Each structure stands twice: as C-alpha cells, then as structure tokens.
C-alpha cells in the first residue's frame, strides 16, 4: 500500500467523496466495512447446491469474493455506488416481450458496455480522492472481479436484496448498475437500511418464465434465462428453449414485475441510450447479420461477450418460438449449414418447431 502524506479528516473526506460521486453521475453512494460472514455462508451453500451451473470461476475464486482484503490486501473499506440506466427513448419492454417477432435484449445491454462506463467514473472518483488525501491503496470494480457487490451495497445503505436476488432501493427501484472502490482509507461507515421491504410479495417469483427463483432469495442459475443466453457457452437445454420465448440476451421479467420499480428514475446518461435499434429489433433482421456486422454493431457493447455463435444460437431459439411464417422458416433455413455445430443444432430444433 502507498503511504499517505498528511493527516486526514476522514469524516470530511467521506462527505466530499459522496459529493464528488454525485457530480460524476452516481445516484447513490455509501461506505461499508469488509466483513461478510453470513453472505459467505450463503454463497458456499449456493455453490454446494450447484446453482452456479457452468460458472466454474465462482468456485475457483474461493473466499476472495467474500473477503475483500484477500482480493486486495490492505482493504478496510468499500465505497459502493449505484448508477441508473433505464432510458426513456426505447420501445416499451412489455410491448417487445408480447411480440414474438421481435427480439428482447435486457435493458441494461442496449447501450455502451456498463463495465467501461462505471470503471471510468470510479477512476475519476479515486483521482479526486488522491488529490485531497494523497496516494492511497485502492482498486475499482464494476461487475469485473470476484466481488459480492450486492451484499456490499446493501451494507453501505444503498438498498436491500430482493427475493429475485437483485438489489432494490426504496426510491430508485432496481434499474441501476453497481460499482465499488476497495480502499485502505479508514473512512467512517454508513448504516445499512436495516431490513428488506419485499414483505409477502412474490411477484418476481411468479413471473419468472423458467421458475429459476426456486425459493425467496435463491436463484438457480441453471434455470435463469440470463444465464442461459449469456453465461452458458454450450447448448441451451431443450426443455427450457420454449420458455426462453423471444429473449435473446438476458431477461428482465423479475424487475418488470417488481412493484418497487414504480419509483425507478430514468437515466440521463447518453452512454446507456439504445444503439442500432436493439430496443425493438426484428428477429429475422438480426439473424441476417454477418459476423462482421455483429462485430461492428456490438462494438463497445456488453453483448459482444457472448460471441457471434452465441448470438445466433439465442436468435435461433427465439425464431423457433416465433409464429410460423415464410420469412421465419427462410431465415432459419439460410443457416441450416452454418459452420458452427452449436448454431446448426439450434437451427434444426427451431425448424422442427415449424414443421420444416
């Protein structure tokens, strides 16, 4: 760790950090410690149940995820932030989901890759801190390392973890990203909200297309459409394909059903504005993209991480679930001999759904 140069008023510094964070576009910020014993136990149980599916890295990271000082030695505090991403100029999510000819992309992935946006803002925040406090030990994260970000944000007073396992804020809903700064500065900590506010509501559980929320606060990733369309590299289980519907990248159903999202705020961040009409695209149009077009149109987007074959796999499933039409069958038939085994298998399944 780097040695600080002067005595610091940490209470004043914490107040300044919150002001700077809001100036940088963060809608919420809190500071917490690094102790997460109960969350570590829940994570261990989740892994033992195999709910992580093919995400082997969840096990490989061991306790680094639940013990910040193991990931970055010297860490004594975590600065947790949230940034709203819901945009106004986009087709209504419910409207897209209700039209099986269209492809649904999770609202968080419509604009610029949030990893880059949040990390850039957090680095600017750290620079402001160093200008005042002198060089310190720190590291910034935005869903980019083994970090229990929702638990840390909860402890920092940014909300509570809902039954769908997402963080919920009473005044912001859940349409926001989370980011963290691990630091060796002994800043004063903020109190958590104290309790969750889901009550008896089970709207998120009832609406989940694949029943992936197997119990309150427990999600089996192997059933989750976000996992199936993003994290899973191989074939989507045949039994789950009809349930995926027209969701081609992620799933927002649990958030769309959450009554707390009536308090969600629209984001003015231009980086998160929809690109290339992906807020309401026609499936047949997307399926015609060449690999070059895919690379160009997903440049700087979180979507690129699944690769071209994963993209086509997901769209093939959605086309298999679409109403039978000449355009749909022709689109699928055009890729019946695709070089990718993964794509060919899903195309054949989709064609069989249309009797072709």
Image (cartoon, grey):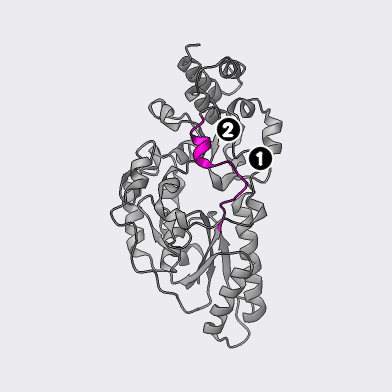
Whole-percent x and y of residue 309?
Answer: 58, 30
- Secondary element at image label 2: helix
Q: Residue at x 71, y 37 (%)?
A: 296
Q: Which mark is residue 311?
A: 2
Task: Tell me what residue is drawn at x 62 percent, y 73 percent.
Answer: 20
Q: Which residue corresponds to the image point at 64% horizontal and 63% vertical from the top-left?
A: 121
Q: Quadrant of residue 238?
A: top left
Q: Main secondary structure of the magenta part?
A: loop
Q: Is 356 placed above or below 56 here?
A: above
Number of the label disc, if any, that sits on residue 298: 1
Residue 260 position in % (x across, y down): 42, 55
Tell me if residue 89 is in the magenta stretch: yes
Between 139 and 239, the residue placed more toward the observer is: 239
Q: Is residue 331 left or right of residue 148?
A: right
Q: Badge 2: few (under 14), some or many (20 or more) residues near its Cα, within 10 Å?
A: many
In front of the other: 194 or 39? 194
Disc 2/disc 1 C-alpha distance (Å): 11 Å
Q: Is residue 221 left or right of residue 96?
A: left
Q: Earlier in the sequence, mark 2 or mark 1?
A: 1
Report the number of discs. 2
**Residue at 47%, 12% in the rendered image:** 355
Q: Which residues are magenta?
A: 84-99
């Amino acid at each position: 760790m780097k040695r600080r140069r002067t005595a610091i008023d940490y209470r004043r510094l914490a107040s300044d950090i919150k002001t700077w964070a809001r100036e940088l576009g963060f809608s919420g910020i809190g500071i917490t410690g690094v102790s997460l014993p109960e969350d570590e136990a829940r994570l261990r149980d989740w892994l033992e149940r195999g709910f992580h599916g093919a995400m082997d890295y969840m096990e490989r990271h061991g306790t680094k995820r639940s013990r910040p000082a193991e990931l970055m030695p010297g860490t004594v505090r975590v600065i947790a932030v949230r940034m709203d991403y819901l945009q106004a100029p986009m087709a209504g999510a419910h409207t897209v989901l209700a039209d099986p000819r269209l492809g649904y992309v999770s609202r968080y992935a419509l604009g610029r890759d949030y990893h880059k946006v949040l990390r850039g803002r957090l680095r600017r925040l750290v620079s402001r801190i160093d200008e005042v406090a002198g060089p310190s030990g720190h590291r910034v994260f935005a869903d980019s390392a083994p970090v229990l970000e929702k638990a840390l944000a909860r402890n920092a007073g940014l909300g509570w973890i809902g039954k769908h396992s997402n963080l919920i804020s009473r005044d912001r809903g859940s349409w926001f990203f989370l980011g963290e700064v691990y630091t060796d500065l002994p800043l004063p900590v903020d109190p958590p909200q104290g309790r969750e506010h889901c009550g008896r509501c089970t709207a998120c559980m009832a609406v989940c297309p694949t029943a992936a929320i197997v119990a309150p606060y427990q999600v089996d990733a192997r059933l989750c459409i976000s996992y199936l369309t993003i994290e899973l590299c191989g074939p989507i289980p045949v039994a789950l394909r009809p349930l995926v519907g027209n969701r081609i990248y992620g799933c927002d159903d649990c958030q769309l059903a959450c009554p707390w999202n009536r308090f969600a705020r629209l984001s003015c961040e231009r980086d998160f504005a929809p690109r290339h009409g992906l807020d309401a695209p026609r499936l047949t149009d997307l399926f015609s993209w060449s690999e070059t077009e895919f690379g160009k149109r997903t440049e700087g987007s979180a979507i690129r991480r699944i690769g071209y074959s994963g993209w086509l796999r997901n769209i093939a499933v959605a086309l298999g679930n679409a109403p039978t039409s000449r355009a749909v069958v022709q689109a699928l038939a055009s890729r019946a001999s695709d070089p990718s085994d993964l794509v060919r298998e899903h195309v054949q399944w989709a064609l069989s759904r249309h009797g072709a």
